Amino acid sequence: MTISSTINLFSLNVSSGIPIYRQLIDQIKQAVRMGLLSTHEQLPSVRGLAKALQINPMTISKAFAQLEVEGVLVRKRGVGMLVAQAKQDTALSQKTEEALTQFIQDAQNDNLSDDEISTLVQQHLSLKGKKTKENKK
């Protein structure tokens, strides 16, 4: 995949209430799980990605650093950030893949845009996270 097509994988919504770096982290993880980014594939540079997405380079650096800590990306000196060796459990099950495809088709049939679908999913995940934290108290 070319660097410009890699950049097209990302769709950030500044009005979603979810931090941009978190959106980027989630989208990179999803692209890896779905096989859109393959092992050892190079990601765009921090500056290049920041310019293309029109966001602060520090936001990209923060996302890349978190993904490196989580083992999703690896930093290779002189090359940049690469997708790490895939773990066995990162692939989506066929059942999840089919449910996701059906959900997206249903949402598009309801005339929701890609940004609206993404925001809807992110909002539900945020609410789920808050409920989980409240239950632990």
Image (cartoon, rainbow, N blue to C red):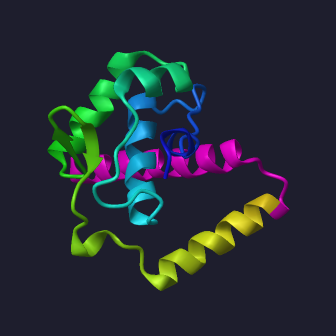
Q: Position of residue 94 (x, y in %)?
A: 48, 84
Q: Which residue is at 55% across, 38% downward?
A: 4
Q: Image check: 105 left or right of 96?
A: right
Q: Residue furthest front?
A: 78
Question: In the picture, residue 102 is in which quadrant?
Answer: bottom right
Residue 100 is a magenta residue: no
Viewer-nearest residue: 74 or 66 = 74
Q: Would residue 133 be visible to someone looking at this image?
A: yes
Specify the quadrant of the image occupied by residue 37.
bottom left
- Above or below residue 57? Residue 37 is below
Q: How many marks?
A: 0
Q: Which residue: 36% across, 25% down?
A: 46
Residue 127 spot, x, y in % from top left? 46, 47
Front-lying residue, 20 or 45:
45
122 to the left or right of 72: right
What residue sits 52% from the left and 51% below the top? 124
Closer to us: 77 or 117: 77
Q: Is residue 24 left or right of residue 69?
A: right
Q: Is residue 32 above or below residue 93?
A: above
The magenta region covers 109-137
Find residue 116 and report its horizontal and vertical position in percent: 69, 44
- Which residue is painted at 31% across and 47% down in the image? 134
Is 109 rendered above or below residue 67?
below
Q: Nearer the viewer, residue 43 or 105?
A: 43
Tell me if residue 19 can be seen: no
Q: Main secondary structure of the magenta part?
A: helix
Quadrant assignment, res 19: top left
Q: Position of residue 8 (x, y in %)?
A: 58, 42
